[in-house]
Image (cartoon, rainbow, N blue to C red):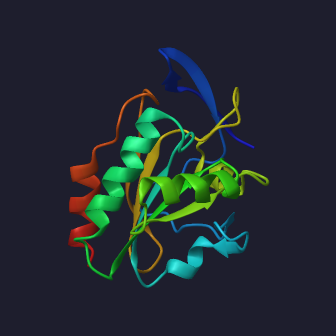
C-alpha cells in the first residue's frame, strides 16, 4: 500500500496518507461503504450522476460538522443529477444520530469504519490516526474523477465553490 508523507497536516504537524493517489482522469474504483442503516453500498452505484465525494475526519468535529451542513444546504439547489456523498470513519449509529440532530437530509452519509476501503482506495487514510483526511473528489457521470482537493490542513474547510462549480459544469 502506497504511503505519501507531508501532504496533509493535523494541527500543523505533518502526517502520512495511506493508499494510492487518485487524480483527475482516473476512473473511481469499486469500493463499499456502510450506510446509516448498516447496508454495504458500492459508490459505483452512483455512476450516471455527478458525484461530489467529501471525506471527513469525524462528523462530531467542528469543521466536519460545518462542512457537512454546508454541503447539505448546497445540495438542496443542485438538482437530481448531482449527488453529494459524505464519508467518515464514524460508526453508522453515531452518524445516524448526528444527521438526525443536525437535520441532514440532502446529502448521503456513509461510514468507512470497517476496513477503510474507500480511504485506502482514494489515498486519504491518515496513518497516524486511522481517520480520513479532509478531501473533495468531483466525479463525472461516467465515473471519472474531474476534480480533487486534498485539504492541506485538516482543520480548514475545503473550497466549496470550486467543487460545486466543477460539478455543475458536468451536468
**Residue 24 visible in the displayed image:** no
Whether residue 90 is situated above or below residue 36 in the rendered picture: above
Residue in the image at 39% along x and 69% along y: 106
Number of numbered tags placed on the structure image: 0
The image position of residue 23, as x and y in percent, is 46, 53
Q: Quadrant of the N terminus?
A: top right
The image position of residue 8, as x and y in percent, is 50, 28
Whether residue 124 is situated above or below residue 153 in the rendered picture: below
In the rendered structure, the answer to whether residue 39 lies left or right of residue 97 reads right
In the rendered structure, the answer to whether residue 143 lies left or right of residue 114 reads left
Whether residue 31 is situated above or below residue 97 in the rendered picture: below
The image position of residue 119, as x and y in percent, is 64, 50
Q: Quadrant of the C terminus?
A: bottom left
In the rendered structure, the answer to whether residue 125 lies left or right of residue 38 reads left
Q: Among all residues in the image, which is located at the extreme right?
A: 115
Residue in the image at 69% along x and 29% along y: 129
Asked which quadrant contains residue 137, the reply is: bottom left
Residue in the image at 58% along x and 43% along y: 124
Q: Nearer the viewer, residue 113 or 2?
A: 113
Q: Nearer the viewer, residue 79 or 29?
A: 79
Residue in the image at 20% along x and 60% along y: 165
**Residue 162 visible in the displayed image:** yes
The image position of residue 54, as x and y in percent, is 46, 53
Asked which quadrant contains residue 48, the reply is: bottom left
Q: Nearer the viewer, residue 164 or 66?
A: 66
Amino acid at each position: 500500500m502506497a504511503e505519501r508523507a507531508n501532504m496533509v497536516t493535523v494541527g500543523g504537524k505533518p502526517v502520512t496518507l495511506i493508499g494510492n493517489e487518485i487524480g483527475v482522469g482516473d476512473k473511481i474504483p469499486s469500493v463499499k461503504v456502510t450506510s446509516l442503516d448498516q447496508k454495504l453500498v458500492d459508490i459505483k452505484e452512483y455512476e450516471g450522476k455527478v458525484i461530489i465525494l467529501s471525506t471527513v475526519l469525524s462528523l462530531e468535529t467542528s469543521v466536519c460538522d460545518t462542512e457537512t451542513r454546508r454541503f447539505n444546504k448546497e445540495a438542496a439547489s443542485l438538482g437530481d443529477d448531482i449527488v453529494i456523498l459524505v464519508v467518515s470513519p464514524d460508526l453508522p449509529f453515531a452518524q445516524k444520530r448526528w444527521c438526525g440532530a443536525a437535520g441532514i437530509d440532502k446529502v448521503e452519509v456513509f461510514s468507512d469504519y470497517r476496513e477503510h476501503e474507500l480511504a485506502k482506495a482514494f489515498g486519504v487514510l491518515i496513518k497516524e490516526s486511522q481517520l480520513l483526511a479532509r478531501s473533495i473528489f468531483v466525479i463525472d457521470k461516467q465515473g471519472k474523477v474531474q476534480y480533487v482537493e486534498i485539504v492541506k490542513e485538516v482543520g480548514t474547510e475545503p473550497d466549496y465553490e470550486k467543487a460545486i462549480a466543477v460539478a455543475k459544469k458536468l451536468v
